[in-house]
């Protein structure tokens, strides 16, 4: 791979207009990009719970400010959960009662949202549950879903992009009996490795270049430096055999294509909401902002000291050598890719009680602003905390048909995410979904002009949840709506009380 050309390409692509400060130019000024593949990959620690006086376990963590040397000799101001950048991995089991104490040690309001988790609306951690500077928040809920790789991140109104960009995000893993019993790698940090993939751009003084021109709002704040678990081009030693990767596209707005430098095939074993029914062979995988994939990669052919790279191609044009794998010569614990994983029942269109239509629109219609603000909407509306956009009956199964309606001028992809549920993709442009998209999902990519039909069931909890574009600059600009799950029995009981006043 021609590194020099990539760098030049990267710099060339920095023709994004940024008012004021210049962008970081590597090897200029004080900031020097760190040597490639010199730092060993860091794996976020699993957050240990604390035993309370009443004998119950408490998961406690805090958001705080910090700094990190992404570039040699320059400190970048950051945000992190417990540490300087990103956060510890929260690990729970299906059926577990989880009690959390979150402290906001920032100087700003934030929230903690459990992305992909089915929780009561008041513990969802969306923009309706702000945690003020210095305040705490203590959610308590039961894990009512199967093993999966979820994540947590802030979600305060209008601030999600700014907080995530500076480092607030962590993994949230669920285990269950099925995932325990499958012959998959599951030694966390040894052969079961989380990879949080994020692109970032920096100013020359080392600070994050999180500014939003109209271009940045429309296309997302895209960066020329790719971080894996918060490190620029780390390396990891891999055993001879299988390694499992739990990959999160933790970028603000980027779409990535993942592949290996030697074009080797790998096996996709899980999507957003859990394992697939069987491993799917692939040589590349596309991931939109907020999506997760679990992969098995076979390194049994790698001799001691041999290497290859994880490549991350950015839809915006950059191509990154993201992570180097170096053969350790050690024997892996798992060598055989299982034939099947977990039986996953899919919801069928015939099961639906209702359907809805969501247009994710990019246009400069009447009454909309001249600049970026105003162009992004869902069904012509921008997010309003005081408006419920959709009412859903508890216990119902619904089809949401989502279309990316892009104007002639603005061909922008979107990443639709729905809180509270895991859905199935019924079809994409009328075609059945690809095998890696056929499992449980909570986030879905829509290229300009695309139309997907999603099916989901709303169970257990009533209350108000969000759906939105997970391109965080779009979300913060208002490409978000609220749905309220209501209990139809309670409504009809209330109605019959009104109709018969004497009762
Ligand atoms: Cu990942 Cu509404 O969030
Ligand atoms: Cu979410
Ligand atoms: Cu979008």
Image (spheres, rainbow, N blue to C red):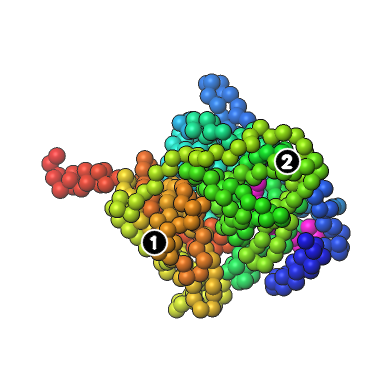
Give the Cα distance between marks 1 and 2.
43 Å
- Looking at the image, can residue 298 be seen? yes
Asked if residue 236 shows in the view, the reply is no
Mark sitting earlier along the chain (1/2): 2
Left or right of 94, for residue 299: right
Mark 1 surroundings within 10 Å by alpha-carbon count, few (fewer than 14), some (14 through 19), many (20 or more): some
State the residue in front, 34 or 111: 34
Q: Secondary structure at mark 1?
A: strand
Q: Residue 341: horizontal and vertical position, in percent?
A: 50, 39
Quarter of the image for residue 152 reads top right
- Which label belongs to residue 445? none
Q: Could you tell me which residue is drawn at 52 percent across and 21 percent down?
A: 54
Q: Is residue 394 above or below residue 381?
A: above
Disc 2 target residue? 238
95 horizontally vs 171: left or right:
left
SS assignment at label 2? strand
Specify the quadrant of the image occupied by residue 51: top right
199 part of magenta stretch: yes
Q: Quadrant of the C terminus?
A: top left
Q: Which residue is mark 1?
A: 401
User: Mark 1 against mark 2, which lies toward the viewer?
Assistant: 2
Over which residues does the magenta segment extend? 195-206
In the visual, does 339 lie left or right of 229? left
In this view, the residue in front, 325 or 403, is 325
Q: In the displayed structure, would residue 503 be above or below residue 19?
A: above
Going 48% across and 56% down the picture, which residue do you hit? 434
Rendered location of residue 485, percent (x, y): 35, 49
């Amino acid at each position: 791979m021609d590194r020099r050309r990539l760098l030049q390409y990267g710099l060339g692509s920095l023709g994004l207009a940024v008012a004021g400060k210049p962008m970081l130019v590597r090897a200029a000024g004080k900031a020097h990009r760190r040597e490639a593949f010199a730092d060993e990959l860091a794996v976020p620690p699993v957050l240990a719970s604390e035993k309370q006086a009443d004998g119950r376990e408490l998961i406690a963590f805090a958001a705080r400010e910090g700094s990190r040397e992404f570039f040699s000799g320059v400190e970048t101001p950051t945000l992190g959960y417990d540490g300087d950048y990103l956060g510890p991995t929260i690990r729970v089991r299906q059926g577990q009662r989880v009690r959390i104490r979150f402290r906001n040690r920032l100087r700003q309001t934030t929230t903690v949202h459990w992305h992909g988790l089915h929780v009561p609306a008041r513990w969802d951690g969306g923009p309706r549950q702000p945690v003020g500077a210095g305040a705490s928040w203590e959610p308590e809920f039961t894990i009512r879903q199967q093993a999966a790789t979820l994540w947590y991140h802030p979600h305060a109104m209008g601030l999600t992009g700014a907080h995530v960009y500076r480092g607030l995000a962590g993994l949230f893993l669920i285990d269950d009996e099925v995932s325990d019993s499958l012959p998959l790698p599951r030694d966390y940090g040894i052969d079961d490795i989380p990879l949080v993939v994020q692109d970032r751009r920096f100013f020359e003084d080392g600070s994050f270049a999180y500014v939003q021109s109209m271009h940045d709002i429309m296309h997302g704040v895209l960066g020329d430096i790719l971080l894996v678990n918060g490190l620029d081009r780390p390396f990891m030693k891999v055993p001879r055999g299988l390694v499992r990767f739990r990959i999160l596209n933790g970028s603000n707005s980027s779409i990535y294509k993942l592949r290996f430098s030697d074009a080797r095939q790998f096996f996709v074993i899980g999507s957003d909401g859990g394992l697939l029914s069987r491993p799917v062979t692939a040589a590349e995988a596309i991931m939109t902002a907020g999506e997760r994939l679990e992969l098995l990669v076979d390194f049994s052919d790698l001799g001691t000291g041999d290497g290859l790279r994880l490549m991350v191609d950015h839809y915006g044009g950059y191509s990154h050598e993201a992570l180097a794998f170096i053969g350790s010569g050690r024997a892996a614990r798992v060598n055989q890719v299982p034939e099947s994983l977990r039986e996953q029942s899919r919801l069928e269109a015939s099961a639906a009680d209702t359907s809805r239509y969501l247009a994710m629109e990019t246009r400069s219609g009447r009454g909309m602003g001249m600049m970026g603000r105003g162009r992004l909407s869902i069904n012509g509306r921008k997010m309003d905390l005081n408006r419920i956009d959709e009412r859903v009956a508890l216990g119902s199964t619904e089809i949401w048909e989502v279309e990316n309606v892009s104007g002639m001028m603005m061909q922008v992809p979107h990443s639709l995410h729905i809180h509270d549920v895991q859905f199935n993709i019924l079809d994409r442009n009328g075609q059945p979904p690809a095998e890696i998209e056929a499992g449980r999902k909570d986030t879905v990519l829509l290229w300009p002009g695309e139309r997907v039909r999603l099916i989901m069931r709303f169970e257990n909890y009533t209350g108000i949840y969000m759906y939105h574009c997970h391109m965080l600059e779009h979300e913060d600009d208002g490409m978000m709506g609220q749905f309220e799950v209501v209990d139809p029995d309670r409504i009809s009981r209330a109605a019959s009380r009104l109709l018969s006043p004497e009762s």
